[in-house]
Image (cartoon, grey):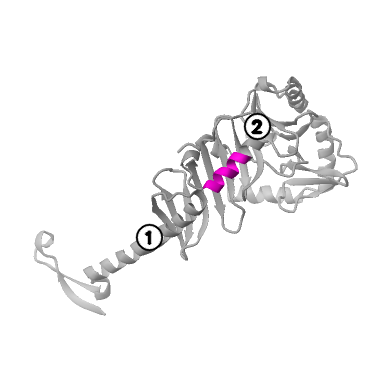
Amino acid sequence: MKLKTPLLVLSSMFIFGAAITTTLNSDVLAEPSKSDSSHSSSASDAANQKMIDAAKSKIEEFTGNSPSLFVSKKEGSTYILKTNKNKSDDIFVSSKGIVTMANLTVKYEELGEVKLKEQLDKAWQLTFPEVHEPLEYVRIRLFEGSPVEVKASNSKGMISLKDGKLEYGVQYANEKEIPSAALKAADIVLNNIGKGVRKTDRKLKVIIIRPGEPAVYSFEYNTNKGKVWVEIEEKSFKPVSVSLWDIVSPYKNKNLSEKEYKAQQKKLNSLNAKTLAKTAQKEAKALMNLDLSGYSAEKYKYSNETLVFTKKGAPEVHAGFTSAGTFGSFTIKKHKVIVLLDKEFIESIKP
Protein backbone atom coordinates (compact mmCIF):
# COMPACT_ATOMS: atom_id res chain seq x y z
CA MET A 1 0.00 0.00 0.00
CA LYS A 2 1.42 3.45 -0.95
CA LEU A 3 0.81 6.53 1.23
CA LYS A 4 1.45 10.15 0.43
CA THR A 5 2.09 11.80 3.80
CA PRO A 6 4.34 14.33 5.56
CA LEU A 7 7.38 12.69 7.08
CA LEU A 8 8.67 14.56 10.15
CA VAL A 9 12.35 14.25 10.82
CA LEU A 10 12.61 13.89 14.56
CA SER A 11 15.18 13.96 17.32
CA SER A 12 18.71 14.86 16.23
CA MET A 13 17.67 14.33 12.61
CA PHE A 14 14.92 17.02 12.81
CA ILE A 15 15.51 19.56 10.04
CA PHE A 16 14.31 22.88 11.48
CA GLY A 17 10.86 21.41 12.09
CA ALA A 18 10.26 21.16 8.33
CA ALA A 19 7.98 18.55 6.84
CA ILE A 20 9.01 16.54 3.79
CA THR A 21 6.29 15.31 1.48
CA THR A 22 7.22 12.03 -0.22
CA THR A 23 5.77 8.82 -1.57
CA LEU A 24 6.32 5.93 0.80
CA ASN A 25 5.88 2.23 0.33
CA SER A 26 4.56 0.86 3.59
CA ASP A 27 5.65 -2.65 2.57
CA VAL A 28 9.27 -1.50 2.26
CA LEU A 29 9.23 0.52 5.45
CA ALA A 30 7.77 -2.21 7.55
CA GLU A 31 10.53 -3.82 9.59
CA PRO A 32 10.37 -7.58 9.99
CA SER A 33 9.09 -8.63 13.33
CA LYS A 34 11.40 -10.43 15.69
CA SER A 35 9.50 -13.63 15.03
CA ASP A 36 10.00 -13.24 11.23
CA SER A 37 13.72 -12.58 11.67
CA SER A 38 14.05 -15.47 14.06
CA HIS A 39 12.23 -17.77 11.64
CA SER A 40 14.55 -16.75 8.75
CA SER A 41 17.64 -17.30 10.87
CA SER A 42 16.39 -20.67 12.05
CA ALA A 43 15.68 -21.76 8.47
CA SER A 44 19.19 -20.75 7.40
CA ASP A 45 20.76 -22.53 10.35
CA ALA A 46 18.75 -25.65 9.58
CA ALA A 47 19.85 -25.58 5.92
CA ASN A 48 23.49 -25.15 6.91
CA GLN A 49 23.25 -27.99 9.39
CA LYS A 50 21.74 -30.23 6.72
CA MET A 51 24.75 -29.57 4.49
CA ILE A 52 27.20 -30.12 7.33
CA ASP A 53 25.56 -33.43 8.22
CA ALA A 54 25.68 -34.58 4.58
CA ALA A 55 29.35 -33.63 4.25
CA LYS A 56 30.28 -35.27 7.55
CA SER A 57 28.58 -38.49 6.52
CA LYS A 58 30.51 -38.61 3.23
CA ILE A 59 33.84 -37.76 4.87
CA GLU A 60 33.32 -40.39 7.54
CA GLU A 61 32.50 -42.95 4.84
CA PHE A 62 35.91 -42.53 3.22
CA THR A 63 38.18 -41.51 6.09
CA GLY A 64 36.50 -42.90 9.17
CA ASN A 65 36.78 -39.41 10.67
CA SER A 66 34.14 -36.84 11.58
CA PRO A 67 35.82 -33.41 11.32
CA SER A 68 34.47 -30.08 12.46
CA LEU A 69 32.90 -28.30 9.45
CA PHE A 70 31.41 -24.93 8.64
CA VAL A 71 29.65 -23.44 5.61
CA SER A 72 32.14 -21.07 3.98
CA LYS A 73 29.84 -19.65 1.31
CA LYS A 74 26.99 -20.43 -1.03
CA GLU A 75 27.20 -20.18 -4.82
CA GLY A 76 23.82 -20.58 -6.47
CA SER A 77 22.31 -23.75 -5.07
CA THR A 78 25.69 -25.15 -3.99
CA TYR A 79 27.05 -24.90 -0.46
CA ILE A 80 30.84 -24.82 -0.08
CA LEU A 81 32.09 -26.18 3.21
CA LYS A 82 35.49 -26.07 4.89
CA THR A 83 37.10 -28.03 7.69
CA ASN A 84 38.50 -26.21 10.69
CA LYS A 85 41.70 -28.25 10.47
CA ASN A 86 42.92 -27.76 6.91
CA LYS A 87 42.48 -24.61 4.83
CA SER A 88 42.87 -26.49 1.53
CA ASP A 89 39.86 -28.74 2.16
CA ASP A 90 36.72 -28.08 0.10
CA ILE A 91 33.39 -29.91 0.18
CA PHE A 92 30.66 -28.99 -2.30
CA VAL A 93 27.11 -29.95 -1.35
CA SER A 94 24.00 -29.43 -3.48
CA SER A 95 20.80 -27.97 -2.03
CA LYS A 96 19.48 -31.55 -2.00
CA GLY A 97 22.18 -32.55 0.46
CA ILE A 98 24.31 -34.46 -2.07
CA VAL A 99 28.10 -34.15 -1.94
CA THR A 100 29.11 -33.40 -5.53
CA MET A 101 32.82 -32.79 -4.97
CA ALA A 102 35.34 -32.92 -2.15
CA ASN A 103 39.07 -32.33 -1.70
CA LEU A 104 40.30 -33.58 1.66
CA THR A 105 43.76 -33.82 3.19
CA VAL A 106 44.38 -35.79 6.37
CA LYS A 107 47.34 -37.19 8.22
CA TYR A 108 47.80 -40.88 7.53
CA GLU A 109 48.05 -41.67 11.23
CA GLU A 110 44.68 -39.99 11.83
CA LEU A 111 42.81 -42.05 9.23
CA GLY A 112 40.07 -44.02 10.91
CA GLU A 113 39.13 -46.03 7.82
CA VAL A 114 40.99 -49.34 8.20
CA LYS A 115 40.26 -50.58 4.67
CA LEU A 116 41.74 -47.44 3.09
CA LYS A 117 44.85 -47.76 5.24
CA GLU A 118 45.27 -51.36 4.14
CA GLN A 119 44.92 -50.37 0.47
CA LEU A 120 47.52 -47.63 0.87
CA ASP A 121 49.97 -49.87 2.72
CA LYS A 122 49.67 -52.58 0.07
CA ALA A 123 50.11 -50.09 -2.78
CA TRP A 124 53.15 -48.52 -1.13
CA GLN A 125 54.84 -51.88 -0.55
CA LEU A 126 54.18 -52.89 -4.15
CA THR A 127 55.61 -49.64 -5.53
CA PHE A 128 58.47 -49.10 -3.09
CA PRO A 129 59.33 -52.50 -1.56
CA GLU A 130 62.66 -51.26 -0.19
CA VAL A 131 61.34 -48.03 1.33
CA HIS A 132 59.98 -48.56 4.83
CA GLU A 133 59.23 -44.97 5.78
CA PRO A 134 55.59 -44.64 6.91
CA LEU A 135 53.13 -42.58 4.91
CA GLU A 136 52.44 -39.10 6.27
CA TYR A 137 49.67 -37.38 4.34
CA VAL A 138 46.65 -38.51 2.35
CA ARG A 139 44.55 -36.52 -0.12
CA ILE A 140 41.13 -37.76 -1.18
CA ARG A 141 39.28 -36.34 -4.18
CA LEU A 142 35.65 -37.14 -4.77
CA PHE A 143 33.65 -36.19 -7.85
CA GLU A 144 30.05 -37.28 -8.17
CA GLY A 145 29.81 -40.11 -10.68
CA SER A 146 33.61 -40.53 -10.99
CA PRO A 147 36.14 -42.91 -9.41
CA VAL A 148 37.52 -41.87 -6.02
CA GLU A 149 41.12 -40.66 -6.29
CA VAL A 150 43.45 -41.06 -3.33
CA LYS A 151 47.05 -39.89 -3.14
CA ALA A 152 49.36 -40.55 -0.20
CA SER A 153 52.90 -39.31 0.36
CA ASN A 154 55.92 -39.07 2.59
CA SER A 155 59.38 -37.58 2.08
CA LYS A 156 60.38 -40.40 -0.29
CA GLY A 157 57.49 -40.39 -2.72
CA MET A 158 53.81 -40.57 -3.50
CA ILE A 159 51.31 -43.21 -4.62
CA SER A 160 48.04 -42.67 -6.46
CA LEU A 161 45.01 -44.96 -6.26
CA LYS A 162 41.74 -44.88 -8.15
CA ASP A 163 38.81 -46.72 -6.57
CA GLY A 164 41.29 -48.54 -4.33
CA LYS A 165 43.57 -49.75 -7.14
CA LEU A 166 47.15 -48.57 -7.61
CA GLU A 167 47.63 -46.41 -10.70
CA TYR A 168 51.17 -45.15 -10.27
CA GLY A 169 53.84 -44.09 -7.85
CA VAL A 170 56.13 -41.08 -7.87
CA GLN A 171 59.58 -41.34 -6.31
CA TYR A 172 61.44 -38.25 -5.14
CA ALA A 173 65.08 -38.87 -6.01
CA ASN A 174 68.27 -37.11 -6.99
CA GLU A 175 70.39 -37.59 -10.07
CA LYS A 176 72.99 -39.68 -8.25
CA GLU A 177 70.38 -42.41 -7.80
CA ILE A 178 69.72 -43.00 -11.51
CA PRO A 179 71.88 -44.24 -14.43
CA SER A 180 74.10 -41.65 -16.07
CA ALA A 181 72.72 -42.85 -19.42
CA ALA A 182 69.36 -41.29 -18.50
CA LEU A 183 71.01 -37.92 -17.85
CA LYS A 184 72.90 -38.13 -21.14
CA ALA A 185 69.72 -39.00 -23.06
CA ALA A 186 67.86 -36.04 -21.56
CA ASP A 187 70.72 -33.65 -22.35
CA ILE A 188 70.77 -34.83 -25.97
CA VAL A 189 67.10 -33.90 -26.32
CA LEU A 190 67.74 -30.46 -24.86
CA ASN A 191 70.69 -29.87 -27.19
CA ASN A 192 68.54 -30.93 -30.15
CA ILE A 193 66.21 -27.98 -29.57
CA GLY A 194 68.78 -25.60 -31.03
CA LYS A 195 67.45 -22.04 -31.45
CA GLY A 196 70.22 -20.79 -29.17
CA VAL A 197 68.76 -22.62 -26.17
CA ARG A 198 71.38 -23.19 -23.45
CA LYS A 199 70.99 -25.18 -20.24
CA THR A 200 71.46 -23.25 -17.01
CA ASP A 201 70.18 -25.96 -14.67
CA ARG A 202 68.83 -29.53 -14.77
CA LYS A 203 66.77 -31.16 -12.05
CA LEU A 204 65.39 -34.66 -11.74
CA LYS A 205 61.86 -33.85 -10.59
CA VAL A 206 60.57 -37.37 -10.01
CA ILE A 207 60.72 -40.97 -11.14
CA ILE A 208 57.31 -42.16 -12.34
CA ILE A 209 56.58 -45.80 -11.55
CA ARG A 210 53.64 -47.62 -13.14
CA PRO A 211 52.80 -51.25 -12.28
CA GLY A 212 54.27 -53.64 -14.85
CA GLU A 213 55.89 -50.90 -16.95
CA PRO A 214 59.38 -49.36 -17.17
CA ALA A 215 59.93 -46.38 -14.91
CA VAL A 216 60.17 -42.89 -16.42
CA TYR A 217 62.65 -40.21 -15.33
CA SER A 218 61.10 -36.75 -15.41
CA PHE A 219 63.54 -33.84 -15.79
CA GLU A 220 63.02 -30.10 -15.58
CA TYR A 221 65.52 -27.82 -17.30
CA ASN A 222 66.03 -24.13 -16.78
CA THR A 223 67.44 -22.51 -19.90
CA ASN A 224 68.27 -19.02 -21.09
CA LYS A 225 64.94 -18.98 -22.95
CA GLY A 226 62.56 -20.73 -20.55
CA LYS A 227 61.80 -24.09 -18.97
CA VAL A 228 61.92 -27.43 -20.78
CA TRP A 229 60.56 -30.76 -19.52
CA VAL A 230 61.95 -34.07 -20.75
CA GLU A 231 60.89 -37.60 -19.80
CA ILE A 232 63.24 -40.53 -20.43
CA GLU A 233 62.17 -44.16 -20.20
CA GLU A 234 64.12 -46.53 -17.98
CA LYS A 235 66.29 -49.22 -19.67
CA SER A 236 65.70 -48.06 -23.26
CA PHE A 237 66.73 -44.50 -22.32
CA LYS A 238 64.52 -43.16 -25.08
CA PRO A 239 62.57 -39.90 -24.70
CA VAL A 240 58.83 -40.44 -24.30
CA SER A 241 57.77 -36.84 -23.72
CA VAL A 242 59.18 -33.38 -24.38
CA SER A 243 57.60 -30.03 -23.56
CA LEU A 244 59.10 -26.69 -24.57
CA TRP A 245 56.04 -24.44 -24.41
CA ASP A 246 58.00 -21.86 -22.42
CA ILE A 247 60.27 -21.40 -25.42
CA VAL A 248 57.97 -21.65 -28.45
CA SER A 249 54.98 -19.96 -26.81
CA PRO A 250 56.00 -17.99 -23.70
CA TYR A 251 52.53 -16.45 -23.52
CA LYS A 252 50.64 -19.75 -23.66
CA ASN A 253 49.28 -19.31 -20.14
CA LYS A 254 48.72 -15.57 -20.46
CA ASN A 255 45.21 -14.31 -19.83
CA LEU A 256 44.07 -13.25 -23.28
CA SER A 257 41.46 -10.62 -23.95
CA GLU A 258 38.30 -11.86 -25.64
CA LYS A 259 39.46 -10.35 -28.92
CA GLU A 260 42.89 -11.97 -28.65
CA TYR A 261 41.38 -15.32 -27.72
CA LYS A 262 38.99 -15.32 -30.68
CA ALA A 263 41.81 -14.41 -33.05
CA GLN A 264 43.97 -17.20 -31.63
CA GLN A 265 41.19 -19.78 -31.95
CA LYS A 266 40.43 -18.71 -35.51
CA LYS A 267 44.09 -19.16 -36.42
CA LEU A 268 44.32 -22.57 -34.71
CA ASN A 269 41.20 -23.81 -36.49
CA SER A 270 42.50 -22.64 -39.85
CA LEU A 271 45.73 -24.65 -39.67
CA ASN A 272 45.80 -27.61 -42.05
CA ALA A 273 46.45 -31.05 -40.53
CA LYS A 274 48.58 -32.25 -43.46
CA THR A 275 50.78 -29.17 -43.33
CA LEU A 276 51.12 -29.49 -39.57
CA ALA A 277 51.99 -33.19 -39.90
CA LYS A 278 54.91 -32.45 -42.22
CA THR A 279 56.32 -29.93 -39.75
CA ALA A 280 55.76 -32.30 -36.82
CA GLN A 281 57.54 -35.18 -38.56
CA LYS A 282 60.64 -33.06 -39.09
CA GLU A 283 60.65 -31.66 -35.55
CA ALA A 284 59.98 -35.03 -33.86
CA LYS A 285 62.87 -36.60 -35.77
CA ALA A 286 65.24 -33.75 -34.96
CA LEU A 287 64.20 -33.42 -31.32
CA MET A 288 63.57 -37.00 -30.17
CA ASN A 289 64.84 -39.12 -33.07
CA LEU A 290 61.20 -40.16 -33.37
CA ASP A 291 60.26 -41.45 -36.82
CA LEU A 292 56.63 -40.60 -37.63
CA SER A 293 56.73 -41.74 -41.25
CA GLY A 294 53.89 -44.11 -42.05
CA TYR A 295 51.66 -42.58 -39.36
CA SER A 296 48.28 -41.05 -40.08
CA ALA A 297 47.68 -37.63 -38.58
CA GLU A 298 44.56 -35.71 -37.66
CA LYS A 299 43.56 -32.99 -35.25
CA TYR A 300 42.50 -34.22 -31.83
CA LYS A 301 38.74 -34.01 -31.43
CA TYR A 302 39.06 -32.77 -27.85
CA SER A 303 41.65 -30.06 -28.52
CA ASN A 304 42.22 -27.78 -31.50
CA GLU A 305 45.90 -27.40 -30.61
CA THR A 306 46.85 -31.10 -30.64
CA LEU A 307 47.72 -33.33 -33.57
CA VAL A 308 47.33 -37.10 -33.09
CA PHE A 309 49.53 -39.57 -34.96
CA THR A 310 48.36 -43.18 -35.25
CA LYS A 311 49.87 -46.30 -36.76
CA LYS A 312 48.83 -49.93 -36.46
CA GLY A 313 50.87 -51.71 -33.82
CA ALA A 314 52.40 -48.49 -32.47
CA PRO A 315 51.37 -46.20 -29.61
CA GLU A 316 49.71 -42.89 -30.42
CA VAL A 317 51.83 -39.78 -30.50
CA HIS A 318 50.29 -36.46 -29.45
CA ALA A 319 51.92 -33.27 -30.69
CA GLY A 320 50.89 -29.87 -29.34
CA PHE A 321 51.13 -26.86 -31.63
CA THR A 322 50.73 -23.10 -31.47
CA SER A 323 48.61 -20.79 -33.61
CA ALA A 324 51.80 -20.08 -35.56
CA GLY A 325 52.08 -23.75 -36.50
CA THR A 326 55.15 -24.45 -34.34
CA PHE A 327 55.25 -27.43 -31.98
CA GLY A 328 55.59 -27.13 -28.22
CA SER A 329 55.28 -30.75 -27.11
CA PHE A 330 55.53 -34.38 -28.21
CA THR A 331 54.25 -37.27 -26.11
CA ILE A 332 54.32 -40.98 -26.91
CA LYS A 333 51.14 -42.42 -25.39
CA LYS A 334 52.64 -45.81 -24.63
CA HIS A 335 51.58 -45.91 -20.99
CA LYS A 336 48.15 -46.99 -19.80
CA VAL A 337 48.02 -44.31 -17.12
CA ILE A 338 48.82 -40.68 -17.85
CA VAL A 339 50.53 -38.99 -14.93
CA LEU A 340 49.87 -35.31 -14.36
CA LEU A 341 52.28 -34.34 -11.63
CA ASP A 342 50.18 -32.92 -8.84
CA LYS A 343 52.37 -30.01 -7.78
CA GLU A 344 49.60 -28.65 -5.60
CA PHE A 345 49.54 -31.93 -3.66
CA ILE A 346 53.31 -32.07 -3.33
CA GLU A 347 53.72 -28.44 -2.27
CA SER A 348 50.67 -27.85 -0.09
CA ILE A 349 49.90 -31.29 1.25
CA LYS A 350 50.71 -30.38 4.82
CA PRO A 351 47.78 -28.86 6.75
- For disc 1, the marked residue is 49
Q: What residue type is labelled 1?
A: Gln
- Drawn side of residue 103 relative to residue 188, left or right: left
- Drawn side of residue 51 relative to residue 286, left or right: left
Q: Which residue is drawn at 62% across and 45% down?
A: 161
Percent x, y for residue 104? 49, 46
Image quadrant for the N terminus? bottom left
Percent x, y for residue 113? 51, 48
Q: What residue type is labelled 2?
A: Pro
User: Which numbered circle lies on residue 129?
Assistant: 2
Label 2's element? Answer: loop
Task: Check the image and report above or below for 329 versus 199.
Answer: below
Q: Residues within 10 Å of mark 2 (few under 14, many from 20)?
A: few
User: Which numbered circle lies on residue 234?
Assistant: none
Label 1's element? Answer: helix
Q: Residue at x 47, y 43 (%)?
A: 88
Q: Can residue 255 be seen in this view?
A: no
Residue placed most toward the observer, 61 or 206: 61
For this orientation, the residue located farthest to the right is 294
- Drawn side of residue 232 relative to residue 111, left or right: right
Q: Is residue 262 visible?
A: yes
Image quadrant for the C terminus? top left
Residue placed most toward the observer, 206 or 150: 150
Residue 55 in magenta stretch: no
- The stretch in magenta equals 114-122
Percent x, y for residue 314? 85, 43
Residue placed most toward the observer, 194 or 74: 74
